[in-house]
Image (cartoon, helix red, strand yellow):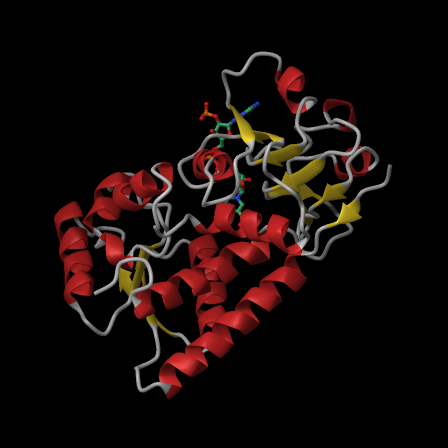
Amino acid sequence: MKARQIDGREVAAAVRAEVADDVQEWVRAGHRPPRLEVVQVGSDPASSSYIRSKTRACAEVGIEAGTMKLPDTVSARELREAVRRLNEDEGVDGILVQLPLPPHLSAHDVIEAIDHRKDVDGFHPMNVGRLVLDQPCFRSCTPAGIRELLRYYEIPVKGKHAVVVGASNIVGSPMAVMLSRENSAGKATTTICHKFTRDLTRHTIAADILIVAVGQAGLIRGEMVREGAVVIDVGINRVADESADRGYRLVGDCDYDSVADRASWITPVPGGVGPMTVAMLMKNTLLAARGSIYPR
Ligand code: NDP
């Protein structure tokens, strides 16, 4: 079997177009445009680049965006104070603290300091807890984007066996929760694998839907995948490539060719899950502005 490609760029463009229409309607109804505020600590080039792409996407859909830049010497208290000011600013709908933070700061502490009603990344314990309880919440953007991909391509989830490789707070864990819940994704039987999982292949080979979010190029090879499985590759890894302008290219966690030979559907890297993450952030910011999750 040669897998069909899931086109994340196309689906993300569709999500952004829908958000842009909804923003226009919201503004036409007399509201101010939604506003996202990004907090950046330090000047890590990768973080700056992610923030630029989020800001560009905001502009495209009519969401206002600002970046609060703080020096990497900022104390935990000063950072919490900055977040508190944004919490209280009625002109700000969504707050996002760009990760990673410098080592002297705790991501958990700063995320908990964000008003959960403005937590458009969906990382606050209130949103994570409500996700587990299958209640309306801001859902972490990458797994929410994957859910959207499955929906767009009408790939059934209910009753399937979904295997999630990787258990981070940002991707793997919320993905596994979503897939197993009724409202969020539709009741798959879900297995979650991590570093201590013994005999990974025993699990991956049993998956109808295999989601891989680890950060190791080539971890999943064709022989680890069931014939006809749906494979979603979240990983983004740089591998050296002298023929590329930048001296490297981006690959996922799956060995694309051998996995595509067995799967029925597969996401490419780049152009699969990546574009969905930013699109879902736009959606969450609109939901925050409209008070759709937490009515005012
Ligand atoms: P983390 O490093 O936070 O988590 C990696 C997870 O993989 C951990 O749960 C870890 O287990 C698990 N793991 C590590 N090695 C193995 C192994 N050999 N077998 C099974 N599980 C293993 O990464 P993230 O979740 O943040 O990101 C994962 C990948 O996805 C990265 O490449 C990242 O760049 C990419 N990513 C892509 C996004 C996109 O928009 N496309 C968005 C976010 C991330 P343990 O819990 O035991 O440590």
Relative depth, front residue between 209 and 279: 209
Relative depth, front residue between 152 and 39: 152
Q: Position of residue 229 (x, y in %)?
A: 73, 34
Left or right of residue 76: residue 23: right
Which image quarter: residue 170? Answer: top left
Please determine whether, in this image, residue 90 is positioned above or below residue 136.
Answer: below
Looking at the image, which residue sits at the far top? 198
| Image quadrant occupied by the N terminus | top right
- Residue 61 in view in this figure: no
Which image quarter: residue 86? Answer: bottom left
Count of labels in the image: 0
Left or right of residue 124: residue 176: right
Please determine whether, in this image, residue 197 is positioned above or below residue 26.
Answer: above
Please determine whether, in this image, residue 238 is positioned above or below residue 15.
Answer: above
- Residue 179 in view in this figure: yes
Q: Position of residue 89 (x, y in %)?
A: 17, 69
Q: Position of residue 71 (x, y in %)?
A: 25, 57
| Image quadrant occupied by the C terminus | bottom left
Q: Residue at x 16, y 48 (%)?
A: 75
Q: Residue at x 62, y 48 (%)?
A: 150
Left or right of residue 62: residue 122: left
Q: Residue at x 33, y 41 (%)?
A: 128
Please determine whether, in this image, residue 26 is positioned above or below residue 119.
Answer: below
Q: Position of residue 145 (x, y in %)?
A: 53, 52
Q: Residue at x 13, y 56 (%)?
A: 81
Left or right of residue 102: residue 157: right
